[in-house]
Image (spheres, grey):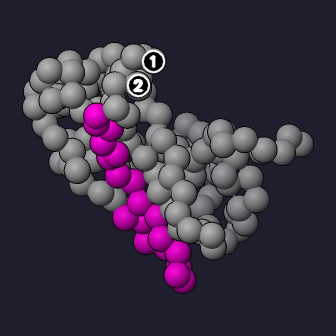
Amino acid sequence: MFYKTGYCFTSRELFDTLNLKSLNISTKVVKQYKMDCLQDLCGAVLTYCLYLIILDIIENNVTFVLPLFGNREACFYVKMFDGDQFRRAYQSGKFLGIDFLNSNFKGYQIYFQYKYRGGWREKPIYINQKLKDKFYENINNGKQYY
């Protein structure tokens, strides 16, 4: 067994310790969706939900707040880079698909922000090329995210 020590993992790995009997889904249903096991089906559903969330953020300029239990909070949002921050990131190759004149010298990236005991943390979300092209096209057409 390999332990997850970095920030990267597959959607299937999230469901490795899932109590499969609590879901009451038969193997017939899993095979109907052409999956090998229930963890793969759960991972595919999660991946598609995250895809829809990111697509909604790109197209409709929304912040998606995750419903969590207790006093915990998390959200997906678009972070803006401008001024010196944008210049340094652009020079290092971060926003090469963005026309800096049309974007008014601003760059944007989708982030995941969550609350923990010590405060807030944020992690950048890396998206596939198809979503990135749509995101950059919106930015180059003058769409502003906030």
- From this viewpoint, is residue 29 visible? no
Give residue 108's quadrant in the image.
Answer: top left
Judge whether residue 66 is colored magenta: yes
Give residue 59's quadrant in the image.
Answer: top left
* Mark 1 touches mark 2? (CB < 8 Å): yes
Local SS, label 2: helix
Residue drawn at point x = 30 percent, y = 57 percent: 63
Q: Amino acid at mark 2?
A: Arg
Residue drawn at point x = 32 percent, y = 38 percent: 81
Q: Is residue 60 left or right of residue 32?
A: left
Judge whether residue 68 is colored magenta: yes
Residue drawn at point x = 59 percent, y = 39 percent: 35
Instruction: Tell me residue 89's x, y (percent).
Output: 41, 26
In the image, residue 69 above or below residue 115? below
Q: How many marks?
A: 2
Which stretch did the figure color magenta? Answer: 65-83
Q: Is residue 29 left or right of residue 1?
A: left
Instruction: Tell me residue 90's x, y (percent).
Output: 36, 21
Query: Pointer 1: residues within 10 angstroms few (<14), some, or many (20+)?
Result: few
Closer to the observer: label 1 or label 2? 2
Q: Which residue is mark 2?
A: 88
Q: CA distance from mark 1 to mark 2?
A: 6 Å
Local SS, label 1: loop
Residue drawn at point x = 28 percent, y = 47 percent: 57
Query: Pointer 2: residues within 10 angstroms few (<14), some, or many (20+)?
Result: few
- Frontmost residue, 94 versus 66: 94
The mark found on residue 92 in the picture is 1
In the image, residue 104 above or below residue 79? above
- From this viewpoint, is residue 23 visible? yes
Farthest residue, direction right: 1
Q: Amino acid at mark 1?
A: Ser
